[in-house]
Amino acid sequence: DAGVIQSPRHEVTEMGQEVTLRCKPISGHNSLFWYRQTMMRGLELLIYFNNNVPIDDSGMPEDRFSAKMPNASFSTLKIQPSEPRDSAVYFCASSPGPLTYEQYFGPGTRLTVT
Amino acid sequence: AQSVTQPDIHITVSEGASLELRCNYSYGATPYLFWYVQSPGQGLQLLLKYFSGDTLVQGIKGFEAEFKRSQSSFNLRKPSVHWSDAAEYFCAVGAPGGADGLTFGKGTHLIIQP
């Protein structure tokens, strides 16, 4: 299996621009998670889906952040408009079972907003 | 809700020496427990997991962890570390049947001295 695939791996954008991060979970996994990692705040859970349905988005920092999962093999995390404080590494993870089973992480997208 | 504590932010070990990374959790019953490793610039990789049964769990890369209910601990061990083990290590806990996903500790940064 190819594992969780994220694109792009690196993104540099200017403040105010829209950013879209993409994730393809492992085939057959029915839960998907979006995380953000920074030096200051560590690993933060932003939102997660189960069977393509958002379960909890309480970790999404602001209305500027939105996530979708239109089908079992694709999810997006969008930031509009982006701000410098959004600079971080964003990880997508998928899980084969219930929400508290092991998660498999993608390589991450390093976002820099200037 | 569950929580997890990794008391050591940094640990330095000489190459070839043994290693123990501490993890304490808070949960009313027996949780699901996980250890992940993150190398620089990489995503989190699952080392091992505990759901039930034998309290000593073997993982990849020569790691093992022991679940101790009386101490609410799930410490990670390795008998002899290699320079390639230098990384960030995260302990995580999940509530069986829960809907909150996993709770991650803040991580322990492992430094290997030659």
Image (tube, rainbow, N blue to C red):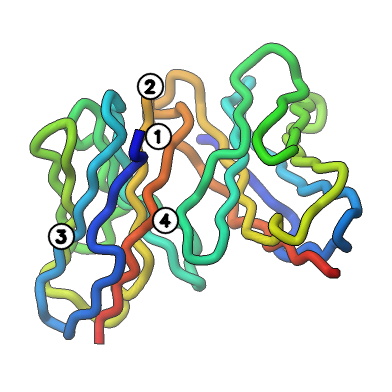
Q: Badge 4: few (under 14), some or many (20 or more) residues near its Cα, within 10 Å?
A: some
Distance, label 4 to label 3, CA atoms, is 16 Å
Name the amino acid, label 1. Answer: Asp
* Residue A76 horizontal/vertical position (percent): 16, 51
Q: In terms of sequence position, does the residue under pointer 2 or pointer 3 come before the other?
A: 3
Q: Nearer the viewer, residue A75 or B60?
A: B60
- Determine whether, in the image, residue B101 is placed left or right of residue B61: left
Name the amino acid, label 4. Answer: Glu
The chain letter under disc 1 is B
Please tell me whether residue B101 is drawn above or below residue A11 in the rendered image. Answer: above
* Residue B68 horizontal/vertical position (percent): 79, 27
Name the residue at 43% across, 62% down. A37
Q: In terms of sequence position, does the residue under pointer 4 or pointer 3 come before the other?
A: 4
Task: Single out the mark in the foreground, 4 or 2.
Answer: 2
* Residue B43 horizontal/vertical position (percent): 46, 54
Give the labeled residue for mark 2: A97
Locate the C terminus of chain B and report the quarter of the image it occupies: bottom right
Give the labeled residue for mark 1: B100
Name the residue at 29% across, 40% down. A48
Q: Which mark is residue A78?
A: 3
Task: Single out the mark in the foreground, 1 or 2.
Answer: 2
Q: Which mark is residue A44?
A: 4
- Determine whether, in the image, residue B24 is placed left or right of residue B91: right
- Determine whether, in the image, residue B112 is placed left or right of residue B44: right
Mark 3: secondary structure: strand
Distance, label 1 to label 2, CA atoms, is 13 Å
Q: Badge 2: few (under 14), some or many (20 or more) residues near its Cα, within 10 Å?
A: some
